[in-house]
Image (tube, rainbow, N blue to C red):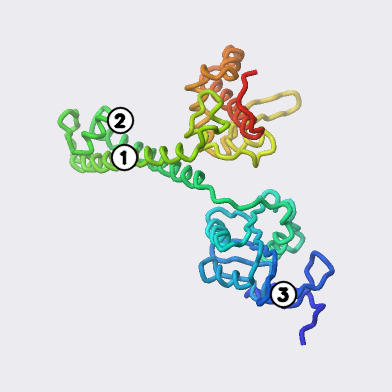
Amino acid sequence: MVETLSEAKSSATGVTNPYRRTEHCDKIHEYRCDKEVGVIGIDVSKDYLITSRGRVRKYENNLKGYEEILDMKPCTIVLEPTGVYSIKPSQYFKEKGVRVLQVSPNVLSREKEFRGKKTDFYDAEKLENMVDKAKEYEYNPLRELVTLYLFLKDIETKYKNRLKRALFLVSDNDKISKERLEKLAMGDFTQEELYQLEYTPLVLEEIKILAKNLLEIQERLKEVRRMIEGQVPQDHVLLTIPGVGKLAAGIVGDVKRFPKPESFVAYCGLDPVVERSGRAVISRGISKRGNKYLRSLFYFLAEMNYSRNPTLLRFYESHKGRLRGKKLFTALARKLARVVWSVWYNNKPYEAK
């Protein structure tokens, strides 16, 4: 006979007592796989899903595991968004009619107890009791498109750098233009002044391949950019900021998870690094920690469009005597990041003050 007052214990295989007292209350919970269990917390990893309930609490992160969890008839599932590993199960359970909630990693880290209780099974149990602090899961196609766009941009940069290296080996001109790329991709070197060296024939083949692939990547980037711009609504609040277009609005994403503008600026790596010793204050530039794409985006927009934005133009005029060159545009980028946070977080159109 099962001892109803026995304490639940997690094992390596994830088998628990079907009748157990949880660590969060004094009630006795009867968990039966043939009954609807209500809320289930799930700790997600690449290979496994650890549940807060069930006779077997360790399931594979694949279709078989999802179906076994569905057999428990959950009405709500609470999990932590762990990147790509949580997207598939979240979308699967949602399409099967189960309510899926996600708890922010920052919120979860504040709730965890680390005194000897840091296990996947314990984390799953904590998630089960955080329904009131979780948000409804929603699939965001715009986010997927942005990650694809940035991935292709990285590939484009690598191809460009490799192509410049190859051009430097056989000529004195490593500039890349659309017209030159098209000729190089076809193997047309008639207008090129080349060094006739031992490695020249091999490098020319490499140039042809790189130029062809670079042209293809650039075409794919245009396609993905059009898809991103198609996902951004015409009345997006960020489009009220002068100089910010649909592509920039899509890349910025949702900043509402940052409670303060300083948090968003730090996420972009635009926060200043200041060292203090006694009365001495030394500035070490920006941290460059965080999202490098947003940092580059804000710097580019600030450099190219500051004259179109009244707030940035006023900042530029008041600081150009003290700051110069990259330092000035970095400060402008930080100012623009704060403007973007304010407009997006408060959901109010931009107003020049």
Q: Quadrant of the C terminus?
A: top right
Residue underneath mark 1: 214
Type of residue at label 2? Ile
Q: CA distance from mark 1 to mark 3?
A: 58 Å
- First reached walking from the N terminus: tag 1 or tag 3: 3
- 28 lies left or right of 323: right
Q: What amino acid type is highlighted by mark number 3?
A: Tyr
How crowded is the residue under tag 2: few (<14 C-alpha within 10 Å), some, or many (20+)?
A: few
Q: Nearer the viewer, residue 52 or 38?
A: 38
Q: In 3D space, how far apart are the residues under numbered discs 3 and 2 (Cα atoms)?
A: 66 Å
Q: Are marks 1 and 3 in contact (CB under 8 Å)?
A: no
Q: Residue furthest right?
A: 26
- The image quarter containing residue 57 is bottom right
In the drawing, what numbered circle is on residue 15? none
Position of residue 248 measured from the top left corner of the image (x, y, whole percent): 50, 33
The residue mark sitting in front, 2 or 1, is 1
Q: Is residue 17 left or right of residue 90?
A: right
- The CA distance from mark 2 to mark 1 is 11 Å
For mark 2, what is the residue?
Answer: 176
Secondary structure at numbered mark 3? loop
Mark 1: amino acid: Leu
Residue at image mark 3: 31
Q: Are marks 2 and 1 in contact (CB under 8 Å)?
A: yes
Q: Secondary structure at mark 1?
A: helix
Q: Who comes first in sequence, dot 3 or dot 2?
A: 3
Could you tell me which residue is drawn at 63 percent across and 66 percent down? 50
Q: Position of residue 11 (x, y in %)?
A: 67, 74
Residue located 73% across and 74% down the image: 9
Q: Quadrant of the N terminus?
A: bottom right
Regarding residue 272, the answer to whether it shows in the image is no
Between residue 193 and residue 235, name the one nearer to us: 235
SS for dot 2: loop
